[in-house]
Amino acid sequence: MKKVVIVGASSGIGYELAKIYSNNGMTVGLAAPEIDLLQQLQAELPNKSYLKVLDVTQPTQARTLLAELVAEMGGMDTLVISAGKGPPLPSWEVELEIIDVNISGFTALANWAYQYFDEQGGGQIAGISSVASLRGRRIGTVYSASKAYINSYLEGLQHISSFKKNNVVVTAIRPGFVATPMVQGNTHMFWVASAQKAALQIYRAIEAKKRIAYVTKRWWLVAKVVKNIPDFIWLKT
Ligand SMILES: NC(=O)c1ccc[n+]([C@@H]2O[C@H](COP(=O)([O-])OP(=O)(O)OC[C@H]3O[C@@H](n4cnc5c(N)ncnc54)[C@H](OP(=O)(O)O)[C@@H]3O)[C@@H](O)[C@H]2O)c1
């Protein structure tokens, strides 16, 4: 039975992904900073699951706790890092938390998992980036930049895999808007997918071992356009 760890499983996309993996017969490891929602999720799952309270803003401890979870599960085939902090009003305290979670925390776990899979002779890491990663933006500037970092970091891991031919698959998921607590109150959204629909597309992209996947799929078109808008127009939008 395949073993999948989801970090950021207590809410939104991670929560729905956990249900999909479990419904498809897989053993899941669920990690997040609070136990209550993880226990609530565990009670809904039809297959064996494991819980770990883990806060990626404590990156060194988070790596140890991930290692513990993987040992308790008897191994890991796929790690999905869904943990993320969103783009609310800018203040240094909030921006620092976004950097801590989306950059330092993300790297701490992706780095640990990559080494684990390399030594194991294969496995898969999926990181949740965002369509917002594609250009620097006046709204959610640090969020966009943190997700651009994730794109670049995951591409770097893909480069290592391709070079070493070590069977470690790396998948970068780039969602558009998804209706989750992270974007609650945002009134400027369009093409908003439900968390269930987004999670299903993410699950399929991971299982298909895609290198990059836009979720929902039509955000691929937005990405193409956004990346090609000349700077003199982009900076006025
Ligand atoms: N929703 C969107 O429109 C959208 C669009 C593009 C990309 N994304 C990305 O998709 C991913 C999932 O977001 P979501 O929309 O599902 O948001 P969400 O409902 O807020 O879920 C975020 C998850 O990350 C966990 N998390 C936050 N800080 C953490 C920390 N320090 N350590 C460990 N886990 C932590 C949260 O746990 P707690 O709730 O306990 O803090 C929660 O389980 C994020 O990376 C986000 O940037 C979302």
Image: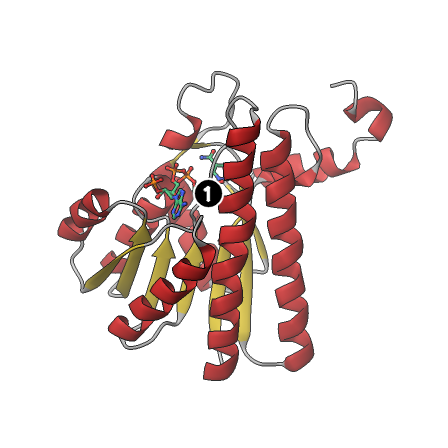
Left or right of 218, for residue 56: left
Q: The residue under label 1 is which amino acid type?
A: Gly
Seen in the picture, residue 5 relative to 221 is either above or below; the reply is below
Left or right of 116, for residue 35: left
Seen in the picture, residue 127 relative to 237 is either above or below; the reply is below
**Spot occupied by residue 71 in the image (x, y as percentages of width and height):** 30, 75
The residue lying at 56 percent from left, 24 percent from top is: 91
Seen in the picture, residue 65 relative to 191 is either above or below; the reply is below
Query: Based on the displayed image, in which of its 4 quarters is residue 145 positioned?
Result: top right
The residue lying at 52 percent from left, 30 percent from top is: 93
Tell which residue pokes out farthest to the left in this image.
43
Left or right of 68, for residue 81: right
Q: Is residue 183 visible?
A: yes
The image quadrant where one finds ligand 1 is top left
The residue lying at 17 percent from left, 49 percent from top is: 39
**Spot occupied by residue 45 in the image (x, y as percentages of width and height):** 18, 54
Beta carbon at label 1 within 8 Å of ligand 1: yes
Q: Quadrant of the C terminus?
A: top right
